[in-house]
Every structure is written in structure tokens, then in C-alpha cells.
Amino acid sequence: MYETTAFTHPIQTRFETTMTHHLRRLSAMTLLALSACATQQDIQPKLKRLDVQQWGLDGQAVPAEGAATEALVPSFGDSTLRALIERALIAQPSIQVVQARLAKAQAQAVATRGGELPQIQATAEVDRQHFTENSIYPPPLGGTIRNTGTLQLEGSWELDLFGRQRALVDAAIGQSRAAQADAQAARVLLSSQVARAYVQLARLLAQKDVAQRTLAQRQESLSLIKQRVTAGLDTVVELRLSEGALPDVRQQIEALDEQIAWSRHALAALTGQPPSATDSLTPSIQALQPMTLPATVPVDLLARRADITAARWRAEASGHVVDAARALFYPNIDLRGYLGFNAIGLDRLLESGSRQYGLMPAIHLPLFDGDRRRANLQGNVAEQDAAVASYNQAVIEAVHEVADQLSSIDSLLRQRREQHAAQTSAEAGYDAALQRYRAGLGTYLTVLNAETAVLNQRRLAVDLQARAMDAQVSLVRALGGQAAAQNNNTLSQSGDRS
């Protein structure tokens, strides 16, 4: 039998040795990369979002992108107030600022989304160059000055195998939605500020009417006391006390005039007008028609409140940023290529022999970077925890704010009932005193004293009515404008519940 001996060519041996060496290096690099990826698994967020359903909110109530509407606050059936709110939503600089921020966030989202797509650009270059005699270009080219031209298309595309670019896009979209919710929150806030300032102006004007009637009443009282002093029925003590009451009321009227001016200036500033633009405003507190609130206020709509929505979008966006930071621990693959012409001598640039093209796939494998990627991830995780904490705080504050306003509304309802009973009694006493005076059974001074109690009750009635309307505006704002939107077909513009 013959024994056969395997023959191995030297080139084949070198090739196998080289391939084995490269495979070992690639395996080592892969193991290093995997170990580098494992170093970020211990970095995790510490906080979680509140379970809003436990707080009485609808956990699914998240408005879609573009769902923001105009701010809805009660205008109490007053066309002037409605016009002021509409003007403020257009002319107020604070609204213009948030609209600009929204436009910027939307533009950033579009720009980030473009990173997912292939990038193509055209290049045209002309270079006048002296070629060295001692480089790769031999004479007669070396040592001469020539024109070099390039005309080509260049393209690149990053293959998002580990979701980094997708996470950045989702984060940018989340920030855009948060900015949109911020704009809606600003509209609701500004609308409520205008409505509250308008109610405050109406309250002050009504208080001034009561104060002026009080001044007239005290002047009449002083006149009667002077007559009684002359007749010897009263002393100088009663006269001086009655005279001292007049400056006190006039001071109250001056203070009310100051507050009225401030309220008008505040309305002018809120609506983007000069201070004198609101000098002619004379709202009547009696003409304002309070909303009739439903028996059950839909507190679950708080999940759609604009500032809570904005906080939620930011918390979710921060989570996507963390995902992008984690993707930095994995290999990055991109494709680059070019196609065009390049020639020494512009007259030969477009010849077929000047064509050039190339495709350059590349893989970037992160190994060691002095813990920069790890620190970046830790920072982003901390930002995520802060965003989640801000969301949780927004939920807690919103729920308590609504609870406070509901308690105030219920308390004011009871206070107004008691005040109405007291005013009814005071009015009845005043009518009785007036009838006795007309029948010659009592003095006019008794009538004036009875009227004092009536004026005090009227002043209190104005304050309670204004507070009730202010509480309604605050409740609608606390619900993010959703109460008025939800009950637009059922809320009437009259009623006692306020």
C-alpha cells in the first residue's frame, strides 16, 4: 500500500494563518465590546411615574399631537371679557414667546428625524496646486502647478441597528409635544388671568358704588345731627363723631380708585395694550352671569391638563434620551459612497477616464473612552429621574389645587346663602324703619342707621359674588380648561352655584 502525504502550499498556509489571526482579533474585539456594553446595565432610573388612577385620574387620557385647543375659561356671558381674552391670546408677548419655543421644538424634531434618512450632497471643487517632485506624482507632473477639479455626488447613511437615532427622534418628538402642551397651558393661564382681573375690576367698581352711597348716607346723617345739636337734642360729641366718619369714607373711595386704576392697567398689560386703553371699561358685577357647575366635576380630566401632559411628554422624552445614550455602547455602522469626476486639468474633468466612485462601509466599535459614555448615561438617567419627579409633582399639585377650589366653591355657596339671609333681614329692617318714619312713628336717623346695615351687607354680597366667580375661573384653570370644554353643551350662563 502506498502512503499519501497531504501537500500544503506555502501561500495557503500564510492565508490560513492570517485569517485565523484576524478572526482571533475580531473575536477579542467582540468580547471587549460586549463587556463594554455590560458595564452600563447597572445604571438604571430610581424613580417611577405615579399611578394616576390611584389619584382619581384617567391614566389613558393623553392628548394626541396637535390636540391642543383654544383656552377655555368662563366669560360669564360678557362679550367685552370674551373680546379681551381673544385679544390677549394674540397680542400678549408671553404667548408669542411660547409659540416661538413651540416652533423651535417642532423644527428640531424635523431636523432630528432627518438623521434617519440617507444624506446626499453635491460637491464641486477647483484647486490650483503645486505638486511636489518628491511625492507620488513623478515628473513631468511633479514640480508643476496644475488645476485640479472634482465634480461628484457624495452620500452617507448611518444604519440604526441598535435604535440610537430612533430614540433621538422619539425624544425630539416628545419635546415638541411638550412644547405644544406648554403653549396650551400658557393660553389657559393667560385667559384665566384676564378673566380674574376683569372680575376684580367689576368688584371694585361695585364696591365704589356702595362706598359712594355710604358717603351720601353719612352726609345726610351729619346734616340731621347738626339739626339735633341746634335743637339741643344732641351734643357736640355726636357731631364730632359724625364729622369724623366722612373723611374715613372718602379715604376708602380714594383707595378704591387706586385699586381700580391698577386693575385697568393690569388688564391693559395682559391684553398687550397701553395703560389708557382700558380707562373706559366699566364692567358690572351684577351683569356677569356665573357658570352652573355640574353636580360632579370630572376630576379625571386632570390627566389631560396641559402642564401635566407637558411633564409626561418630557418624562417620556428623557427615557428616549437614555435609550440613545445606552445605544452608544454598541457598534455603529454607516455607509459612505461617492460618484463623480476628478482630474488634473479642468479640460479633462468630464472625460470618461476621469470617473471615480467608491463605497466605504465602516463599523465603529467603542471600547475604552475614559468612562465618558458611562458618565453621559448616568447624567441622562439623572435627567430622567428629575423629569419623572417633576411629573409626579405636577400631578400632586394639580389634584390638590382642584380639591382646594372645589372646597372653596362649596364654602362660598354656603357663605352666600347665609349672607343672603342676613341681607334679607337687613333690607326688611330698613323697610320697616322707613315705613315708621313716613308714618311719623320714628326718626330719619333710625332709617339711616338701618341703611348702614344694608350697605354693609351689600358690600359683603359684592365680595362673595366676586370671590365665587374668581373660584370658578380658578377651578376651570386647575382643570386645564377641560371643565368648560367637557360641559360646553350643559353649562348655562346663569345659576346660583358658584
Image: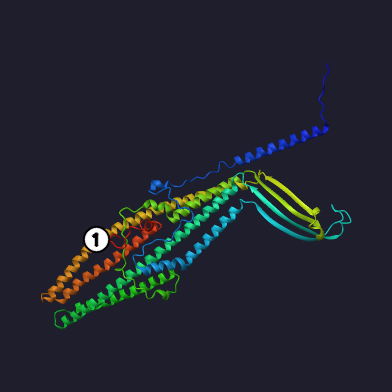
Residue depicted at x 64% and y 51%: 118
Furthest residue toward bottom:
230
Position in image of residue 488 (x %, y %): 36, 58
Residue marked by disc 1: 417
Report the residue that reaches farthest toward the front.
352
Horizontal side of residue 330 vs 74, given as left or right:
right
The three-letter code of the residue at mark 1 reads: Arg
* Residue at position x 55%, y 43% in the image: 43
Residue furthest to the top in view is 1
User: Picture coordinates of residue 224 (x, y %)?
Assistant: 18, 80
**In the rendered image, the vertical position of residue 166 relative to residue 444, given as above or below:** above
Q: Quadrant of the N terminus?
A: top right
Can residue 375 be seen? no
* Above or below: residue 221 compared with residue 299: below
Who is closer to the viewer here, 408 or 67? 67
* Image quadrant in which you'd find residue 114: bottom right
Q: Is residue 489 visible?
A: yes
- In this rendered view, identify the residue nearer to me: 64 or 448: 64
Mark 1 Cα shell of 10 Å, populated few (<14), some (14-19), many (≥20): few
Identify the secondary structure beneath mark 1.
Answer: helix
Query: Which image quarter holds the C terminus?
Result: bottom left
Q: Which residue ends up furthest to the right in the rendered image?
A: 140
- Asked which quadrant contains residue 409, the reply is bottom left
What residue is at 28 percent from the left and 67 percent from the top? 462
